[in-house]
Amino acid sequence: MTTSEGMSVIALGAHILDTLVTPVEAIPDGQAGVVVDRIRMTAAGPAGGTALVLAKLGATVRSAGAIGTDPIGDLLLALLNEHNIDTDLLVRRTEAQTSASVVPVRPDGSHPSLHVIGANGAYTLDDVPWDAIRTATHLHLGAPELLGGEAAGKILSFAREHGVVTSVDCLVPGEPSWLEWIEACLPHVDHLLPNDDQVTGWTGTASLLEGCRQLRERGVRTVAATAGAAGAVVVSADGEFIVPALPTDVVDTTGCGDAFSAGYLRALSLGKRPEEAAVLGCAVAAQVAAGLGTDHGDFTLESLLSA
């Protein structure tokens, strides 16, 4: 039921509130303090962050997942609603806090992360909005590892059966055990959107291209992997493509992967081929990298397509 004119997407999975601090060169010793330039909060995560950017690109977006009943959850809802994202499919858990991260951003834009899984780990198949998925054009599943491969596969295969384009992005690092954990869902994935460390770590390959090939051999139709300043690699039935990153003055790399996913998926909804979609993905990632947090930038789909 996909069209070239509209995009109705369910962003299902990990929704996170990021608290970003910049610049941070070191954590002060003991009880010492340090003055920083900025502290701000934004919706984030491979579902929440991608939902936010997709909404900025003109897609109709519904968020699905689990958050707590705490003030963090209230703020996360407000930040999503600011971008006209439908949050009615987010279930609230009294037994777990809303997932959150504290992200100290270094002067070069890189960052570690202090993370609480929270309510994201409490989402189950009983919570899945099957009827909403049935009527969407796209299902983006963020962090299928929280469900496990078999459960994630049930959701993705259901979407496929109803003509819905499926995509997946993960939070977990590049360790082979994680690939084993999610492998059962891969044959139901139209577009896998990992980063280069995940691809090479999961597959044990030194080459990003070879790692993408191996993931396709496990059933994924198209792999579009980000590689930081090197851009992205797309491996599909039509061939292998290297898409360069766009030049930008990097402030913060938080959310760049989610921004790439959003740009890539939005371009697919317009009828672009995967290698063409990765160009828009890189353009959106460059916009987000130029500021602090996943929601940075005043870009629109029209402004990016006309650039």
Image: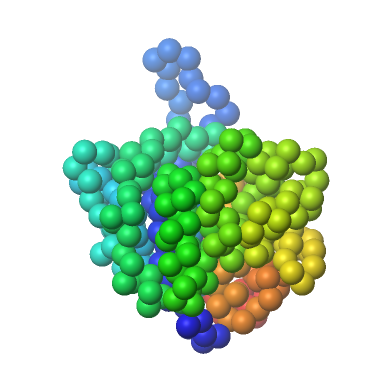
Q: Residue at x 68, y 70 (%)?
A: 274
Residue 231 visible in the snapshot: no
Q: Residue at x 60, y 63 (%)?
A: 191
Q: Position of residue 140 (x, y in %)?
A: 48, 63
- Display coloring: rainbow
Quadrant in which residue 234 is drawn: bottom right
Farthest residue, direction top: 30
Q: Nearer the viewer, residue 82 or 138?
A: 138
Q: Residue at x 65, y 65 (%)?
A: 221
Q: Residue at x 47, y 62 (%)?
A: 156
Residue 126 visible in the snapshot: yes
Q: Nearer the viewer, residue 211 or 118?
A: 211
Q: Is residue 81 left or right of residue 8?
A: left
Q: Nearer the viewer, residue 215 or 70?
A: 215
Q: How many marks?
A: 0
Q: Is residue 264 left or right of residue 56?
A: right
Q: Position of residue 80 (x, y in %)?
A: 35, 60
Q: Position of residue 98 (x, y in %)?
A: 30, 43
Q: Is residue 31 above or below residue 188?
A: above
Image quadrant for the C terminus? bottom right
Q: Position of residue 48 (x, y in %)?
A: 42, 56
